[in-house]
Image (cartoon, rainbow, N blue to C red):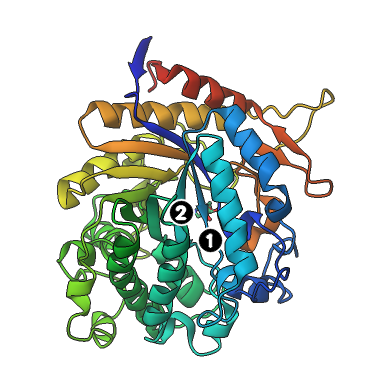
Amino acid sequence: MMQLRFPDDFVFGAATSSYQIEGAWNEDGKGESIWDRFAHTPGKIEDGTTGDIACDHVHRWQEDIGLMADLGLDAYRFSVSWPRVLPNGTGQVSDAGLAFYDRMVDGLLEAGIRPFLTLYHWDLPQALQERGGWTDRRIVDAFCEYADVVSRRLGDRVKDWITLNEPFVSAIIGHWEGRHAPGHRNEEEMLATTHHLLLAHGRSVPVIRANVPDGQIGITNVHHPFHAASDSEYDRLTVEEYDGLLNRTFLDPLVGRGYPSVVPYNRATLDSFIQPGDLDAMTAPLDFLGVNYYTRRIERHPRVPASENLPQTVFPRDEHTEMGWEVYPEGLFEIMERLHRDYAFPQYFITENGAAYPDSVDESGAVQDPKRVAYYQSHLAQTARIVKSGIPLRGYFAWSLLDNFEWSFGFSRRFGIVYVDFETQQRIPKASYQWYRTLIAERAIELDSSD
Ligand code: IFM
């Protein structure tokens, strides 16, 4: 057994997002979001639920901050709902909407918890969708206006800003695969969305910087290592293309390299959206990169028979979460090393990491989640190794504080370290919460031989 200590200033946090927990979907003048519209459309959400109430966090935020304080969190990552603040996306600002975040931020600071604010975690105002949403270039100005309103109001107290959460998901799952709002399946729309998201990010950085001169600004992407199922040429090319799509498309432009060339989409179409100055705007200097890590991806080209692939694919545990995602903690170290080697951001935060498993309340009223505990143990062991290696990783956020609305899966996937009974809204800290609480208190992790 060996123990690794985390630096005293390492930030331990937990994360959530507005649509997934807030509820109060049409209260106090909040505008409709694309997720309200999507979830209300029959057939879009696997279990037929919506985020109308979700964890009712808008009414229970004090109780939720109480849980965070008990857990000993250094930081809490949440997102602001754009249509709660600007019901029509631009123009009229909702005082009630801003006041909610004002109170919540004050509550966090009183509890000694550092707020990390994400501006966009996928709940676009429906009013903007009606004029083309992310496919329409005017979205860039609208996003900058929104960033200005929020950072002006909260920037005296919120110092850690994330422009976008996982733009890959908004673009590809929302506009190409159609599994997320707005539910479109169109490559050209996906590419316009990609470009406008990255441009909105780049253009909003100086806006936030002007309002929060002592702030730190970053973007959060989901990153996986991609492995080839075999060493066939086809599989290796597939890996390069998907790495291009998921990792490089959303990073290369930020460091001045433009879009990658080996990608599974039509580059000429993407290029048609670029206007003079766009690529420069995307390189606005950042203070950190937020990395969401869940699993790795193993790519197999359809032309290569599975029988040829199998010997090359190593599953050290052969364990998968309820999402069907392989548990592969080594991939966290691998991706962080690669990101730092290829992009050298000044700092990193793991802004999400966690696992969905089916949970239930036992006879004693407790929720035992040993698989989630093992998932956190192995991923935090890798986190400690990353810090020890000298990569400037400054913090880790568990996904998620609460069981919540897992997008197209509705409430059927539980990611929380706190169990939520969605009928009664009772919160029950799970065994993984207790495990994380101990880790935060000790600021050290025991590694066993498998770590
Ligand atoms: O729940 C999501 C979150 O909103 C974004 N990152 C991945 C999580 C798990 O799917």
**Residue at the disc numbered 2:** 117
Which label sits on residue 246?
none
Compared to residue 20, the image places residue 402 above or below, namely above
* As drawn, 380 above or below 245: above
Residue 242 in the figure: left or right of residue 40: left
Quarter of the view holding residue 45: bottom right
Answer with left or right where residue 425 lies relative to residue 83: right
Q: Are marks 2 and 1 in contact (CB under 8 Å)?
A: yes
The C terminus appears in which quarter of the rendering?
Answer: top left
Residue 400 in view in this figure: no
Q: In the rendered view, does 224 fall on the left or right side of 112?
A: left
SS of the residue under disc 1: loop
- What percent of the width, then of the height, locates residue 216? 31, 51
Q: Residues within 10 Å of mark 1 (few under 14, many from 20)?
A: many
Classify mark 2: helix, strand or loop.
strand
Q: Which residue is mark 1?
A: 80
Q: Is residue 312 visible?
A: yes
Specify whether tag 2 is near ligand 1 (CB below 8 Å).
Answer: no
Q: Position of residue 173 (x, y in %)?
A: 48, 69
Q: Nearer the viewer, residue 317 or 348?
A: 348
Query: What is the three-letter code of the residue carrying label 1?
Result: Val
- Pick the front one: 257 or 115: 115
Indicate the quadrant where residue 403 lies: top right
| Amino acid at pointer 2 | Leu
**x, y percentage for residue 322?**
60, 45
* Pointer 1 residue Cβ closer than 8 Å to ligand 1: no
